[in-house]
Image: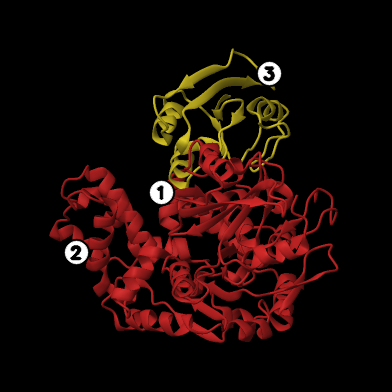
Amino acid sequence: MKVMIAVSGVDVAPRFDLTVEAIIVQVENGELTHEPRELVLSEPSGDELCGLAVSESVELVICGGIDEVHYDYLAWKKIRIIDGVIGPYVRALDLLREDNLSANTILPGGE
Amino acid sequence: MFQNANLITLLDGIPHAVVVVDTNLDVSRMNHLAEALTGRSNGEASGIHADYILRSSLHPFNSYFEPVFGEKQTVVHEGNILDRNRKIVPIRFTISRIESHKGRQLGAMVVLEDLTLAPYLQESLARPDTFDGIVSLNPRMQDVGEQISVFAATDASVLIEGETGTGKGYVAEKIHQASKRSSYPFIKVNCGALPEQLLESELFGHVRGAFPGADHNKPGMFRLADRGTIFFTEVGDLPVTLQIKLLTVLDDGEFFAIGSTRKVAMTARIIAATSMDLKGMVREGLFREDLYYRLNVLRLDIPPLRERSEDVPLLVDYFLSSFSPGELTPRIDRSTMDILKEFTYPGNVRELRNILEHAITLSHGDTIKTEHLPEYLLHGSEAERYASIWRSSGDAHGRNAAEGSRNKDMKWDDVEKEMIIEALRKSRGKRSEAAKMLGWARSTLYRKLKYHEL
């Protein structure tokens, strides 16, 4: 499963539409199968992130807040979204690998 | 830092969302309105950097506090935040320094003034007797517009009846916006979307340790709607046990969070809506009569679109221009308009909107022609479609239309499940098409699919 995480520094970004960085990882059977890839946009853009999610065939997006326009678009493209996540993205990824990450999770250790 | 009970009372008395932060900008305290706006309780938000709770457009967030802490200034900025419903809300942020009586810097107070209503208020001052968004030439709908202003002036419960897609939620929100409660939250509760136990916790809230998994205090919808309006959509789906509890809250004007022994005053106004024949449900013993009369103090009946077909061209114009803001409004040819005028819209205004969205996508901005309309409008028997989708629905009018074939022993859940399966079968598994056939938003269908484990 290909996963995109909207990030801000070491944390999950608070807002999808104001995000310039994203990490793409491949998770299979709870393990990362490839090195995480980092994407950096020239300016914050939820539209561009959505376009990347589709063109990269991402199946799951993890983010902080996401506005309903981008949420509905991703859902329409059959991309699952776990939103409202607060905390370090590495911890979010750990929980995902354990199949324990859900929307609105607050993870310890954020900046 | 701020544990003083008087301060908490003071914050809750301010008619705007307020967040108190320490010098690291971590949240120390939020008032009820801030909890309602962000969807995070004090327990959850405490100690988290405010930018992650507010999700504001002020960027970088810390830089806006420099003059507050450095030069002891109060600063005002306009921007927006992302609220608990994934809506971007325009906000005026007023940030003031907080210091101890010895002048030691303790943190800052951020007041968030919701600017959503500002244009609406200006408009309603200019046109006091109109309600923007109710597009109609129909006398019954014009009555609805007038009733909104009358009902907004009182605090009595309102029951809104109408078929699915007629705009019951829209009318409820208009009543709230026109009332003196408009600066307080409008909280929507979908009684059919959550299992009973979860719904009870969502409504009344719970305290830490109330049940396994309750690891923090959670304010319920009644608390979040403090001094605002709580809107129960599809109130006919409310389980009987919760009907009793709701009635008790309405009678006593107070409630207990699950696991708590402390009474909380209920200050929200109640608006309920249903597409079901609630009176019929009372007769069949499926809905409590006392609750029905308690909710039905003021009543609004929204007519289905097929009974106000004169509004179809108006609504078509309205939706086409709203789909293309700032662009040339797409045209629609006469024969296509004739088809739209003759259709009976079991999904009402929402269905017409979906049809036009479909057509505008396929027409690529050119004139909308019949080939751009969804297939089901052009081929096959509409009566057959109507009957198949609504044969077993809880919708009062649809149910009447297909009364003969309805199995009276079926429960509403079974009926709804069958209706969804039928729509999915007809759309060959295409969910977006099935949602249009059912007259639901796509998100509603997704939620119902999950609920029915389909």
Question: Toward which corner of the image does residue B144 lie, by quadrant?
Answer: bottom left
Chain ID, mark 1: B
Task: Say the numbered circle drawn on residue B341.
Answer: none
Residue pushed farthest left? B334
| Label 2 crowd (10 A; few <14 / some 14-19 / many >=20) | few
- Res B407 seen here: no
Residue B47 higher or lower than B158, as above or below: above
Residue at label 2?
A: B338
Chain coloured yellow in this rendering: A
Residue B380 higher or lower than B72, as above or below: below
Which of the two residues, B323 or A111, is positioned nearer the viewer here? Answer: A111
| Label 1 crowd (10 A; few <14 / some 14-19 / many >=20) | some
Cα–Cα gap, marks 2 and 1: 23 Å
Chain ID, mark 2: B
Cα–Cα gap, marks 3 and 1: 37 Å
Residue at label 1?
A: B433
User: At 43% from the left edge and 41% from the top edge, which residue is drawn?
Assistant: A73
Question: Toward which corner of the image does residue B316 lie, by quadrant?
Answer: bottom left
- Chain B image colour: red
Disc 1 is placed on an element classified as helix
Residue pushed farthest front? B102
Q: Amino acid at mark 3?
A: Glu
Disc 3 is placed on an element classified as strand
Residue at label 3?
A: A31
Q: Amino acid at mark 2?
A: Asp
In the rendered image, residue B2, in percent from the top left (x then y), is placed at 74, 53
Q: Amino acid at mark 1?
A: Glu
Question: Toward which corner of the image does residue B232 lie, by quadrant?
Answer: bottom right
In the rendered image, residue B410, in percent from the top left (x then y), is placed at 63, 67
In the rendered image, residue B259, in percent from the top left (x then y), is placed at 84, 62
Chain ID, mark 3: A
Disc 2 is placed on an element classified as helix
